[in-house]
Image (spheres, rainbow, N blue to C red):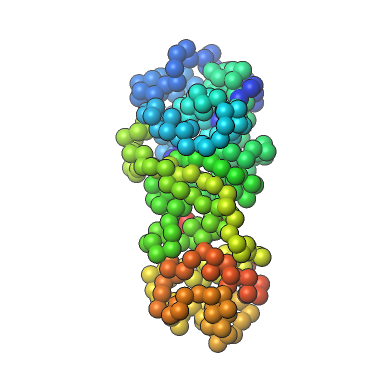
Amino acid sequence: MRKRSTGSSSRAERSRPTSRRSLRVDGPVPLRPEEIAAVLELVGVEPSRSLGQNFLVDRTVAAREAALLDVAPGTEVLEIGGGLGPLTQALLDRDFRVTVIEREPRFASYLATNFAGRIRVIEGDARTAPLPQVTVCAGNLPFSAAHEILVRLVREGMEHGVFLVQREVADRLVAMEGSRDYGRPSVLFRVDGVFLGGGRVPSSSFHPRPAVDGALVVWRRDPLDPSPRDRSTLETLLEVAFEQRRKVLGRRFPGALSRRFPLPAEKVPALVGEADWPQGWERLRAEEIAPDRFVALANLLPPPSRRPTASPAPR
């Protein structure tokens, strides 16, 4: 889902001029469906289902999201995707200094005009555009791109953040071992920190109304000990472990691991023991192994024979 635009705090930058009539809208940020429709017509944007362009109609969601940022007034916050500005306004209401990165040029112009002198707007895609050196982030993320954006923010040093994502994605991000939602993303994000749940956001909070609910998640950097010596090794190990996630590890795991690493299958049980996996791990599923035990085993493995070619999928 894509919920809003981008914002900053002390100045506004318009990346390109617009040929349309004035984008200034007097009054509060549009929240009622008819207000949103009028502004979308003004800026010349028709909501795209493929881009997840659904806009908040519940002011309390934006206020709650901003309140979950546990930082002092005056802190610089990078907002991912400002849309029509509900979260931007909520962040400003808490006296944060806001920079917004917004991929839609017409939304970027709208934000720069209506928050002129109060925010900085960067036109660009948060997945690929250069990002400012900001360690606190917030955003209502497009449901289709949330995982990719979060991976990038974490790897570029985000210390703390609050995000609105699809509820199913949120369940995976906050899942602990033993949960059916626990999987590769749960482990890989846990290497650098933790996601905590911030509450459900019903689909009725958006216009147009999406088919699924959303949820807020809170990120805090808290690196695991041990840390992985080589992330590609850990990613390959997790691919092997979770490729048949509903089956017990049993005899399957050693053979599958030996096909991805230059390692005889008969040596796997000894390495698993050295990594301090639970007794009777053969009768467990991958979802019952804690993140630090996966990291411990990855640190004992040789480099994989075939390295992963893509970032981990949501499952």
Q: Which quadrant: the C terminus?
A: bottom left
Residue 248 position in % (x across, y down):
40, 75
Q: Residue at x 44, y 23 (%)?
A: 40
Residue closest to the far front: 72
Residue 235 position in % (x across, y down):
57, 64
Q: Total label count?
A: 0
Residue 54 appears anywhere in the view: yes
Horizontal side of 182 relative to 267 (left or right) equals left
Answer with the quarter of the image where residue 22 lies: top right
Answer with the quarter of the image where residue 228 lies: bottom right
Residue closest to the far bottom: 266
Q: Where 182 falls versus 126 (above or below)?
A: below
Q: Residue at x 33, y 38 (%)?
A: 203
Residue 294 position in % (x across, y down):
54, 68
Q: Residue at x 56, y 35 (%)?
A: 71
Residue 141 appears anywhere in the view: no
Q: Which quadrant: the N terminus?
A: top left
Residue 143 position in % (x across, y down):
45, 44
Of residue 286 and residue 199, the one placed in the foreground of this image is 199
Answer with the quarter of the image where residue 309 lies: bottom right
Q: Where 310 falls versus 73 (above or below)?
A: below
